[in-house]
C-alpha cells in the first residue's frame, strides 16, 4: 500500500488556472505512472515524457505487479485478464521506491481490459492518497475506452484527488500509431502548460 503524506502546500485545492500558473512558473515535477502488459502503454508513456517541455520535469514510473498472473500468450490472456477486470480485482504492486508527495501533476494510465481498468491500475488508484493531488488519466484501447476513464476518475476523486484532464488513445498496433503519438504529445503539452 502506498502511503503518501499530506501535501501542505495547498490548504485548499487550487483551481485549474492556479495549477496551470504553478506548472508554468515553478519547477514542477510531473510523474507518468503507467501499467503496460505488452509494452504499448510503456511506449506511449515514454513518448509523453519525451514530448513534455523540459520545465515539466517529467519522470516515468512503471507499475509492476509483484506477480503477473495473466498469461502472456494465447486466448488465456484475454480470459484471465478480462475476468480480473470485470470482477474489479486488484493485484499487489512492487514499491515505486519514492514518495508521490513531491509531484505536482501525476498522470496515470494503462490498457483497457474488458472495457474497464486493469488490476494493477485499480490497485494503484485505490491504495494511493490523492488528497489535493492534480491527476490526469489516460487509457489505451484497441476497441473503445468503455468505462475505464470513468472508473479511474471515480477512484481518484473518492480518495481526494482533483482531475486535471482525461484522454483515451488507440492502441499503437491499431489505427495510425503516428496519430496516437501526436495526440498524446499534444495532450501532454496542454497538461503541462505549453502552448501548442
Image (tube, helix red, strand yellow):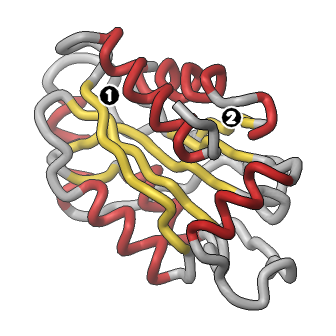
> Which residue was labeled with disc 1?
71
| Secondary structure type for disc 1 | loop
Residue 77 x, y percent position in the rendering: 24, 30
Q: CA distance from mark 2 to mark 1?
A: 25 Å
Q: Nearer the viewer, residue 94 or 12?
A: 12
Left or right of 132 on screen, residue 43: left
Residue 158 x, y percent position in the rendering: 45, 83
- Looking at the image, which residue is at 67% across and 38% down? 61
Image mark for residue 60: 2
Q: Nearer the viewer, residue 160 or 114?
A: 160
Residue 101 x, y percent position in the rendering: 81, 65
Q: Nearer the viewer, mark 2 or mark 1?
A: 2
> Are the residues at dot 2 and dot 1 in contact (C-beta closer than 8 Å)?
no
Is residue 87 shown to the viewer in this render? yes
Q: Residues within 10 Å of mark 1 (few under 14, many from 20)?
A: few
- Looking at the image, which residue is at 19% across and 18% down? 74
Left or right of 147 on screen, residue 20: right
Earlier sequence position, callout 2 versus callout 1: 2
Q: Residues within 10 Å of mark 2 (few under 14, many from 20)?
A: some
Amino acid at each position: 500500500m502506498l502511503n503518501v503524506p499530506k501535501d501542505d502546500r495547498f490548504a485548499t485545492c487550487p483551481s485549474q488556472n492556479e495549477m496551470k500558473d504553478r506548472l508554468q512558473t515553478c519547477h514542477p515535477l510531473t510523474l507518468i505512472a503507467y501499467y503496460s502488459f505488452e509494452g504499448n502503454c510503456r511506449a506511449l508513456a515514454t513518448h509523453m515524457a519525451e514530448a513534455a517541455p523540459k520545465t515539466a520535469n517529467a519522470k516515468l514510473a512503471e507499475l509492476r505487479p509483484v506477480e503477473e498472473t495473466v498469461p502472456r500468450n494465447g486466448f488465456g490472456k484475454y480470459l484471465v485478464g478480462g475476468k480480473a477486470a470485470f470482477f474489479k480485482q486488484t493485484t499487489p504492486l512492487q514499491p515505486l521506491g519514492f514518495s508521490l508527495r513531491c509531484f505536482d501533476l501525476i498522470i496515470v494510465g494503462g490498457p483497457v481490459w474488458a472495457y474497464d481498468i486493469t488490476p494493477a491500475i485499480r490497485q494503484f488508484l485505490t491504495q494511493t492518497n490523492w488528497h489535493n493531488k492534480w491527476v490526469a488519466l489516460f487509457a489505451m484501447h484497441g476497441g473503445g475506452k468503455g468505462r475505464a476513464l470513468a472508473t479511474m476518475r471515480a477512484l481518484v476523486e473518492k480518495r481526494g484527488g482533483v482531475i486535471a484532464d482525461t484522454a483515451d488513445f488507440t492502441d499503437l498496433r491499431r489505427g495510425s500509431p503516428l496519430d496516437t503519438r501526436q495526440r498524446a504529445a499534444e495532450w501532454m503539452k496542454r497538461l503541462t502548460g505549453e502552448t501548442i
